[in-house]
Image: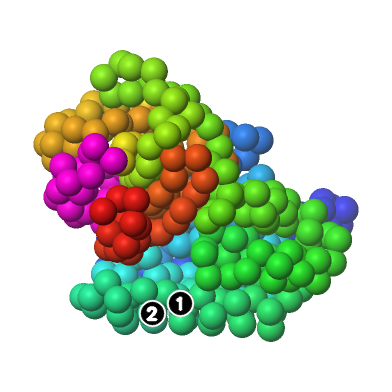
Amino acid sequence: MLALLATSWRVAAQSCIVTGQINGVGAIPIQFRYIQNGVDKIDTVFATGDRFRYVAQKPDNGMFDIFIQNPAWTAVWYEAGNLTVSGNIDKAGQLEVKGTKENDLLTAFNQLRWAYREKAQGQPAEAVDKLIEEHTRKTWAFMKVNTPSLTAMYLLNGLTNGADVKIEDLDEAFHEFPPQIRESYYGKRAKERIEIVKNQPVKGKKAPDFKLVSSKGDSVQLSRHSGKYVLLDFWGHWCGPCIRSMPELREFHEKYKSKITLIGIAAEWGDDKETWLKTIEKHQANWIQLTDFRFDQGDIMKTYNISGFPTYLLIDPKGMVVARENNFQAIAKIVAETKALR
């Protein structure tokens, strides 16, 4: 009997037990999403009096997500111990998770992130860009102060997706972590991302060749358009800023079509094919349109290091990258100032 009790105590001590109160959740299902042995899994619980309890399953990447009202979700570290979750249904994507070292850190960072998100609401594009730059600096500072920790490595991995941190700084920061964290799931991802960033096509580098079938069924290869300027537009039907820029892209295409080949490359899944085609038709995006239906996991997206949408790359007649921007007005200004395109 004592042996059985000792075993049960050890199991409990090694478990990740989640209890929480989400005001107003009522009968809305609370989902716990994670990947285990390479398989996407979803566990669902329902609250009683807005309170719930869940024993987490160990995920491959060390994290699981709490989904309440899609797309509202909160990332949580799987750590042995008792986690407490608190929040309100009207802010279902801003749940506070506390009780263990890494989750306390992640919640502290999330509070910083949420504050910047609220500041950005309703602001013009230029103001949002400045807030993003400021947020990136704060994220970097938070990461450095909390190195070494899994949360800091998680943030470093995220910082590899931005354009505001030098690759040398990313590489140096990565090597400040001890081996066990560098070999963690997000450590391995950060290392891979840093290598991708090192080799990404930026201004002055050769644009990697690619070949895809267009929305019209034609085979399109970048190198076949050498001798002429090319503008690559990385977008998606789900991307608000991408869709809002369509009228400007149509005007751009009409103005420069004799000098610039415009190629849209969409991040879509296979199930999105009809929606993608209807979006092209609806917005009269009658230039070359491509996708490999692998969203951002395809070879082109990875080779070009596309982590934000839209992303624009201007390529000169020799196949060299002239400019890389996430803002259409910025790329249009560069085109307007290029003598060969006047």
Residue 192 seen in the figure: yes
Check disc 1: other Cα within 10 Å, few if <14, some if 14-19, many if 20+: some
Residue 130, labelled with which disc? Answer: 2
Residue interval drawn in magenta: 236-259
Q: Is residue 176 above or below residue 188?
A: below
User: In which quadrant of the rendered view does residue 253 lie?
Assistant: top left
Q: In the rendered view, would you say 301 is above or below 189?
A: above
The residue pinned by badge 1 equals: 133
Q: Main secondary structure of the magenta part?
A: helix
> Left of 39 or right of it: where is 81?
right
Displayed quadrant of residue 170? bottom right
Residue 243 located within the stretch drawn in magenta:
yes
Badge 2 amino acid:
Lys
Q: Camera-side residue: 160 or 22?
A: 160
Measured Cα–Cα span from mark 2 to mark 1: 5 Å
> For the point 80% across and 71% down, which residue is it?
176
